[in-house]
Image: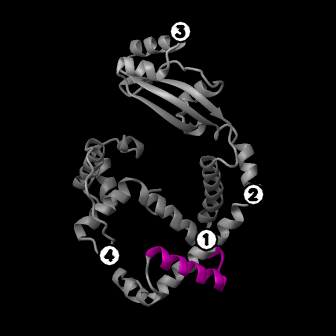
Amino acid sequence: AFRYEHDLITAEETEAFLANRGLTLDDFTDYFTRHYCAVAITEKVPSEDIDYISASSELRQVFMAEAILSGELDRMTTELMWRLAVRCAEKEVDSEALAAEERSFLDRNKIASAQLPNWLERLGRDLEWFNEMVAMEAVYRRRCETVLVPQARQRELVMLRLPLTRFETEMIELESHDAAQEALFCVREDGMSMEEVAIEGRYPYRRVDFLFEDIPSDAQQRFLSVSAGDVLEPLARGDGFELCRIIKKIEPQADDSMVGLRIEQRLLDRHFSELASKYTQRRLGA
């Protein structure tokens, strides 16, 4: 799935992808092994809280591989590009905003002002670099406040009524189409609940909430006209089938935290993507 997501069809393309990012095939294999173990091992494994500066070189390499292969580095790169772009666009920074941003950073990292020079030295950075980072964050935060105004949020909410419609559902995973059809008959005709069918057949059962825009495009049509209580026809999923019942269909509301986050992200993506295109260029991972 990872290779198809990144359009890596051949082994040679995968090796080139890794080499361009300073990774090896061992890093690639170890990444998936870690994620498999995290799911397969149910007992709690004690972990040690180690900051980046104190970590060994081996642990830093694992961290780097995890950040790259999980896509987290791409996300952080995008956010850095946004900050660089707004810093290029806005040269003046309010002194109070700078002071507030510095206090926030020190509090968040539990660093006293007197400790800052030594902390930066361990990172290979100095106060000049730190002051520029603080200024960049301050102008970015100020620009976000101008983008995320109530009027813009409301306009976006109206435009995204369908994509941000939320579905509360219950699902059963079944091994075959015949089993899924039998479960569907039990729910529709015999009046059994989804959970009862799952227990009787020993099938995995779960409750799932999602937004319309998160549904795969080839399955969205099925959800356009559903109502609460509807049980959808079985849907192929991996090696088996999935039976879905709609518990609730909820139109987006301004006070819904999930909806609010999506609206904020869309507004910020649109604004800063345009700004970043004027001042920055992504060299890797575009």
The magenta-colored residue range is 87-109
79 relative position to 263: left or right:
left
Q: Amino acid at mark 4?
A: Ile
**Residue 27 highlighted magenta (yes or no):** no
Return the residue at label 2. 150
Q: Secondary structure at mark 2?
A: helix
In terms of sequence position, does the residue under pointer 3 or pointer 2 come before the other?
2
Badge 1: how crowded within 10 Å, few (<14), some, or many (20+)? many
Q: Judge whether 272 appears above or below 196 on screen.
A: below
At 49% from the left and 15% from the top, the residue drawn is: 192
Return the residue at label 4. 53
12 relative position to 129: left or right:
left
Q: Which mark is residue 33?
A: none
Looking at the image, is mark 3 or mark 2 nearer the viewer? 3
Return the residue at label 1. 140
Coordinates of residue 238 in the picture (x, y in percent) = 38, 28
Residue furthest top as drawn: 189
Q: Amino acid at mark 3?
A: Glu
Coordinates of residue 12 in the picture (x, y in percent) = 28, 48
Looking at the image, is mark 1 or mark 2 nearer the viewer? 2
Q: Main secondary structure of the magenta part?
A: helix
Residue furthest bottom as drawn: 114
Q: Amino acid at mark 1?
A: Tyr
In terms of sequence position, does the residue under pointer 3 or pointer 4 come before the other?
4
**Residue 93 highlighted magenta (yes or no):** yes
Q: Amino acid at mark 2?
A: Pro
Q: Is residue 232 visible?
A: yes
In terms of sequence position, does the residue under pointer 3 or pointer 1 come before the other?
1
